[in-house]
Amino acid sequence: MNRSIQLSLLAALLTAGFTSQAQAADSPEAQRAEIRKMCDAALATLVKAKPKLKTVIAKSPGYGCFSSFGVTLLVGGAGGRGLVHNNATGKTTFMNMGQASAGLEVGIKDYREVLVFHDAKTLNSFVENGWELTATGGGAAAVEKKGGSAEGGASLGGKISIFPMTETGLSAGGSLGGRKYWKDKELN
């Protein structure tokens, strides 16, 4: 693995660790409530922008919502928290996320993403194993939810649709990266 990608992954995991430590002062119940609130807001924003997705999400095996903060200057890292909800069982699993990327991208942003799973096997594998490789591109500019974004995301393998939404920040370019999602032992 390229040394810069290894350093970016380490930075992402540290960012996720710092996020977890900062939230450790809150009770697990308060943390779960905050993650659910973020997910509800992300879903509402997505459905408002793309109303047809409401039915797609409802009929899917499940969905995930993640909140993340990242910095990129050719190589980058991000970390955050979220949840995955299984529509068939009603079970919600709380998860952490770390990301490393490399490419022609510059930016800093606080963003949300909604993942829609297209089959139960992929949903279960995601919760248990957590790896997903992604390629992203686009641009975003938003300050305090004012601004716009033209972001695109693709899941290599096509079994998960990813819908990114920038809350605050600025970024431009494209990158190839890896993400690791894993169960949050404290919140499950």
Image (cartoon, helix red, strand yellow):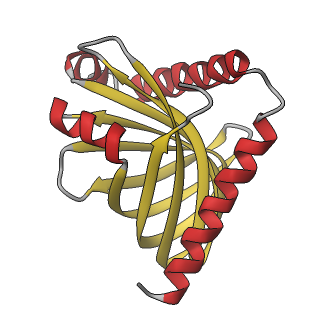
Q: Number of numbered discs present?
A: 0
Query: Compared to 86, does 66 lie above or below?
Result: below
Query: Compared to 150, does 36 lie above or below?
Result: above
Name the foreground residue: 121 vs 109.
121
Q: Residue at the spot x=34%, y=28% of the render?
A: 63
Q: Residue furthest bottom?
A: 3
Q: Is residue 154 left or right of residue 168?
A: left
Point out the image quarter for the N terminus: bottom left
Q: Residue furthest right?
A: 25
Q: Quadrant of residue 9?
A: bottom right
Q: Where is residue 42 shown, x and y percent of the image?
A: 52, 28
Q: Is residue 160 left or right of residue 172?
A: left
Q: Where is residue 141 shown, x and y percent of the image?
A: 62, 54
Q: Residue at the spot x=76%, y=21% of the render?
A: 27
Q: Quadrant of residue 80?
A: top right
Q: Residue at the spot x=68%, y=61% of the render?
A: 14
Q: Where is residue 146 shown, x and y percent of the image?
A: 68, 39
Name the foreground residue: 109 vs 78.
78
Q: Where is residue 167 shown, x and y percent of the image?
A: 63, 42
Let me know if residue 131 appears in the view.
yes
Q: Residue at the spot x=58%, y=74% of the render?
A: 8
Name the foreground residue: 82 vs 154.
82
Let me know if residue 119 appears in the view.
no
Query: Compared to 97, does 6 lie above or below?
Result: below
Q: Residue furthest front?
A: 185
Q: Quadrant of residue 89?
A: top left
Name the foreground residue: 159 vs 54.
159
